[in-house]
Amino acid sequence: MLNQIPDSTLRILDANLNRLREGIRVIEDILRYGFNHKDFALQLKNLRHRCKINNFESLLHSRDSQNDVLKPSTKQEQNRANLKSIVVANFKRAQESARVLEEILKLSEVSKSEEFKEIRYTLYILEKEILEKFSF
């Protein structure tokens, strides 16, 4: 169904899918390498692997990174106080991206939209568990 979606909408899907997977990967690597926590790292890895949309070629074709009007980082994005601030920022990044994917996919693939809703709620649960367990 993605072939019926305008390139501008595909670009939104592509950017948010990348942002979602990247945010999860940052948290996964902090727990994997920084804390040697296999269980959380594996849960995040499995969640990241669920973050996919069929017809990757359409998404790739719509990508226009060089013309992203908000490509430069803000001062807030450039400053992180500690690992906790990185984990929190990346949970928020992933949750927000999952929400965008959930909403945009309602235009064409409602079942896929529901998958991203489930991913978003899983991120809320993992965020609480991880932030309560670790003192960063």
Image (cartoon, grey):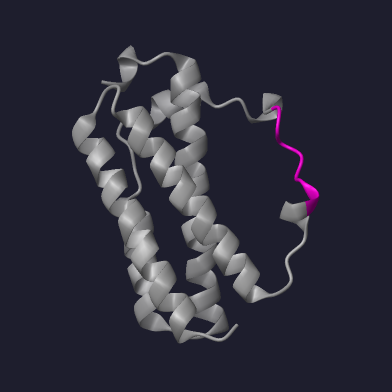
Residue 49 can be seen in this image: no
Residue 2 quadrant: top left
- Residue drawn at x 38%, y 69% is 126
Q: Nearer the viewer, residue 71 or 92?
A: 92
Residue 125 can be seen in this image: yes
**Residue 64 x %, y %:** 61, 25
- Residue drawn at x 40%, y 23% is 58
Q: Quadrant of the N terminus?
A: top left
Compared with 99, 44 (above or below) is below
- Residue drawn at x 55%, y 74% is 30
Residue 136 forms part of the magenta stretch = no
Q: Nearer the viewer, residue 53 or 123?
A: 123
Q: Is residue 93 left or right of residue 116?
A: right
Residue 70 forms part of the magenta stretch = yes
Q: Which residues are magenta?
A: 69-75
**Residue 123 x %, y %:** 38, 60
Compared with 44, 11 (above or below) is above
**Residue 107 x %, y %:** 30, 22
Q: Is residue 34 left or right of residue 43?
A: right
Residue 82 quadrant: bottom right
- Residue drawn at x 32%, y 16% is 3
Q: Main secondary structure of the magenta part?
A: loop
Q: Is residue 98 left or right of residue 35?
A: left
Compared with 101, 118 (above or below) is below
Compared with 48, 103 (above or below) is above
**Residue 122 x %, y %:** 32, 61
